[in-house]
Image: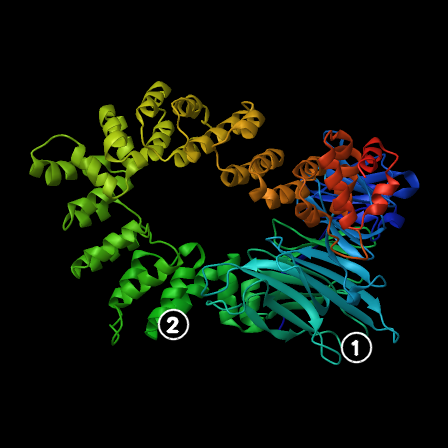
């Protein structure tokens, strides 16, 4: 019986038809770093062809001489390589961002993020950040298993950039292709060697876990004599983790026995849908489900195998360029996959899993029938999970609630409908109908405290109907629900009838205390503001809950409150969490309102670190002479402000940590090294006159290879910091440090410079 193919396959474009010479369509000359751009180096014409895939496959030819060129995955930034010279250009601004001369040839390179290029040489792997002036940073050395004779075919970075995967192949003496992979951890600085040909990372949500798992999917073997298998395993997680480590039993990769020497050449995993696409040397496409490791589809689809492949962000499929100039597009056909899995694979559980993740056509009928089956079998938990996972929650209806209510109670178990609600709450929150029904059940059982807990956990959708139910047993709880639901009239009526009458007072103070207790600060602020009860806002932030002032002021800004009133309110605040206030105004781009208030507090002698921290953020954001403040102020917290500056401006972070003294030496070194501030670091080290500190930065990590950061720092010490120094002790300590680090030759080689001549004068 034939089945409709679950895969779409089409040619997106042909480079030959665009005028590209076929001789240039080959690895190295033709690159594709994402689904946005395709790039071809035409060395014979000293030009580069750029095809914008996101703009209707428009083509432009630029006069650029390059051995290889790669375009940033998200922006019009191009990196070009001519022998060992690397350069990065912004094509829109027509400006060079940075350049670097590598000491050895680059054998493989690619963008691993929108700001970082990975460079692989015969000996090591480097990362080059385009957003600073630092040179490429050494990440790790190639293992002996991936020596210089290995052809590097792939380099991948995990979603969190904590794991790297280098893949290489070579031919053994018998002519067999051997593949090795080096899995490197940025955290532990260690490598693990795997035998494999292709691999990729993906972040998934394993069943039964609330956190994500970083998963490595690769095609390889366990050892000599073992068959080729697909391995799916979580990496970078403690093996003793309480919720376990995700893994799938290795799956045999079915290659055609009649075809000799076939092997995987590329692996892509589409995030979100968690589908792995594997291409083999002989043109076979194998599609796998990452969660189960099951093979969804296998077929020989091409004779000319793509030599570069990338994910398509829209279809969640795969793009590939062939040596014939074709750009091929492969993707799962969402209209046919479900029927294919049910009829060809005969796997209903797999179909359910795929339908939930991929929103496949026809999933509603599948989920409905499975839900009916489980209900008939009195499988409460199974039915609850099916309803919870149903696409777009189409099964989460009042009718479903009614079906659980009609199920018989089970011995020593909660009511079926309560079990259903518990499953939904584990996975998120309840909708309006579910919240109302849960409230009815709990109130019938006199369990209003549990209802209150669910409300405070934000697990229920507040509505007028839910408030009406709560009002039957607890006016204060009802007040909370009405306020959250935006039913202000009923909130006020509830207050008047149940609280104000008892206290014989028309003042909203009782309402204020009630809202404060239930943390309905924004709702209270809106009520008082819209009813022009401004004096009670003053009372609330001045006497009742000064710690809630940031939330009140933030809400007032959202409501379009007059700035003069907000400034007046600020002026009345004596005790207030300054840091939170700063955050509330910062996310609304209104830090300017805080400047004079903070300056007045400081002028009155306030020395609290939080106040000075906040003013530092204001000056940095508004560009109000931040450097002077960061250097001269004595009261801000260097750790807090430094971390803020690392995101805003790394140079400011350097100034902050430098101002912090010896306790922040490690932070000074880290920030300067990560951001290429070697000249500033050199000056700092010379001024500090600390041999132990010098030892940290001059100590060689590897005897055989020079660290690029260390070299950059040494150059700045010799050429900048020493010549600028006017203190004999600084120069003397520096020379001692160089000698301790066995860098006497560096001094001798540079003694012709003024600073080095002065160095020797001190001995």
Q: Is residue 20 left or right of residue 697?
A: right
Residue 335 shows in this picture = no
Q: Position of residue 245 (x, y in %)?
A: 53, 68
- Earlier in the chain: of badge 2 and badge 1, it is 1
Q: Position of residue 262 (x, y in %)?
A: 78, 71
Q: Is residue 543 left or right of residue 82?
A: left
Q: Position of residue 265 (x, y in %)?
A: 75, 63
Q: Is residue 694 above or below residue 180?
A: above
- The crowd level at tag 1 (other Cα within 10 Å; few <14, some 14-19, many 20+) is few
Q: Residue furthest top?
A: 564
Identify the residue at horizontal 21%, vertical 56% (top origin). Answer: 449
- The crowd level at tag 2 (other Cα within 10 Å; few <14, some 14-19, many 20+) is some
Identify the residue at horizontal 57%, vertical 25% (top origin). Answer: 628
Numbered disc 2: secondary structure? helix
- The image's mark for residue 258 is 1
- The image's mark for residue 63 is none
Q: Is residue 161 left or right of residue 108?
A: left
Q: Quadrant of residue 346?
A: bottom right
Identify the residue at horizontal 26%, vertical 74% (top origin). Answer: 410
Instruction: For the C terminus, give its image quadrant.
Output: top right
Residue 119 shows in this picture = yes
Numbered disc 1: secondary structure? loop
Q: Quadrant of residue 398?
A: bottom left
Along the line of sight, which residue is nearer the eye, 120 or 68?
Answer: 120
Q: Position of residue 619 (x, y in %)?
A: 51, 26
Along the line of sight, which residue is nearer the eye, 477 or 744?
Answer: 744
- The image's mark for residue 373 is 2
Along the line of sight, which residue is nearer the eye, 301 or 721?
Answer: 721
Q: Is residue 315 above or below residue 260?
A: above
Instruction: For the N terminus, give its image quadrant.
Output: bottom right
């Amino acid at each position: 019986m034939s089945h409709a193919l679950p895969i779409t396959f089409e040619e997106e474009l042909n480079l030959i038809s665009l005028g590209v010479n076929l001789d240039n369509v080959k690895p190295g000359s033709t690159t594709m770093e994402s689904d946005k751009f395709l790039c071809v180096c035409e060395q014979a014409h000293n030009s580069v062809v750029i095809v914008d895939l996101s703009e209707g496959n428009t083509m432009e030819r630029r006069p650029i001489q390059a051995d290889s060129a790669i375009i940033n995955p998200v922006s019009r930034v191009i990196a070009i390589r001519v022998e060992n010279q690397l350069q990065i250009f912004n094509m829109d601004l027509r400006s060079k961002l940075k350049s670097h001369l590598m000491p050895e040839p680059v054998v493989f390179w690619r963008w691993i993020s929108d700001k970082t290029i990975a460079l692989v040489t015969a000996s090591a792997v480097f990362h080059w950040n385009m957003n600073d002036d630092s040179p490429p940073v050494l990440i790790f050395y190639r293992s002996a298993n991936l020596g210089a004779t290995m052809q590097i075919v792939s380099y991948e970075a995990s979603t969190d950039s904590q794991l790297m995967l280098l893949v290489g192949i070579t031919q053994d003496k018998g002519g067999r292709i051997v593949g090795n992979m080096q899995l490197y951890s940025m955290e532990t600085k260690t490598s693990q060697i795997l035998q494999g040909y292709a691999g990729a990372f993906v972040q998934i949500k394993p069943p039964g876990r609330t956190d994500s798992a970083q998963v490595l999917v690769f095609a390889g073997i366990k050892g000599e004599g073992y068959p080729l298998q697909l391995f799916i395993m979580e990496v970078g997680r403690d093996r003793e983790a309480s919720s376990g480590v995700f893994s799938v039993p290795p799956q045999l990769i079915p290659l055609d026995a009649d075809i000799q020497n076939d092997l995987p050449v590329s692996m892509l995993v589409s995030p979100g849908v968690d589908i792995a696409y594997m291409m083999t040397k002989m043109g076979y496409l194998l599609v796998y489900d990452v969660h189960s490791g099951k093979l969804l589809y296998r077929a020989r689809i091409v004779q000319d195998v793509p030599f570069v492949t990338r994910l398509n962000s829209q279809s969640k499929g795969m793009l590939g360029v062939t040596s014939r100039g074709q750009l091929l597009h492969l993707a799962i056909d969402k209209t046919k996959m479900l029927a294919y899995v049910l009829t060809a694979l005969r796997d209903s559980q797999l179909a359910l899993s795929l339908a939930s993740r991929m929103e496949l056509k026809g999933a509603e009928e599948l989920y409905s029938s499975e839900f009916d089956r489980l209900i008939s079998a009195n499988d409460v938990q199974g039915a609850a999970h099916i309803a919870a996972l149903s696409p777009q929650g189409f099964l989460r209806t009042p009718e479903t609630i009614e079906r659980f209510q009609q199920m018989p109670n089970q011995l020593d178990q909660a009511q079926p409908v309560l079990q259903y609600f518990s499953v939904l709450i584990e996975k998120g929150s309840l909708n309006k109908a579910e919240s109302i029904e849960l409230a009815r059940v709990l109130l019938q059982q006199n369990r209003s405290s549990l209802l209150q807990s669910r409300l405070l956990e934000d697990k229920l959708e507040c509505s007028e109907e839910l408030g009406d139910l709560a009002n039957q047993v607890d006016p204060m709880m009802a007040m909370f629900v009405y306020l959250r639901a935006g039913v202000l009239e009923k909130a006020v009526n509830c207050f008047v009838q149940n609280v104000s009458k008892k206290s014989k007072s028309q003042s909203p103070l009782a309402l204020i205390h009630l809202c404060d207790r239930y943390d309905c600060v924004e709702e209270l602020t809106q009520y008082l503001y819209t009813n022009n009860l401004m004096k009670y806002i003053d009372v609330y932030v001045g006497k009742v809950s000064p710690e809630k002032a940031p939330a009140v002021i933030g809400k007032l800004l959202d409501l379009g409150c007059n700035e003069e009133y907000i400034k007046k309110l600020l002026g009345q605040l004596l005790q207030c969490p300054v840091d939170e206030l700063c955050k509330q105004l910062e996310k609304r781009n209104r830090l300017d309102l805080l400047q004079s208030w903070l300056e007045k507090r400081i002028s009155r002698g306030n020395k609290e670190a939080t106040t000075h921290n906040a003013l530092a953020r204001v000056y940095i954001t508004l560009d109000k002479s931040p450097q002077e403040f960061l250097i001269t102020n004595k009261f801000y917290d260097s750790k807090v402000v430094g971390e803020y500056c690392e995101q805003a401006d790394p140079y400011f972070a350097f100034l902050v940590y430098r101002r912090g003294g010896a306790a922040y030496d490690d932070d000074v070194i880290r920030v300067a090294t990560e951001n290429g501030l070697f000249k500033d670091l050199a000056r700092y080290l010379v001024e500090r006159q600390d041999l132990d500190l010098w030892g940290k930065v001059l100590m060689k990590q590897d005897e055989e290879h020079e660290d690029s950061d260390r070299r950059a720092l040494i150059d700045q010490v010799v050429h900048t910091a020493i010549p600028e120094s006017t203190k004999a002790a600084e120069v003397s300590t520096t020379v001692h440090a160089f000698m301790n680090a066995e860098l006497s030759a560096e001094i001798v080689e540079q003694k012709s410079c003024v600073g080095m001549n002065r160095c020797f004068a001190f001995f």
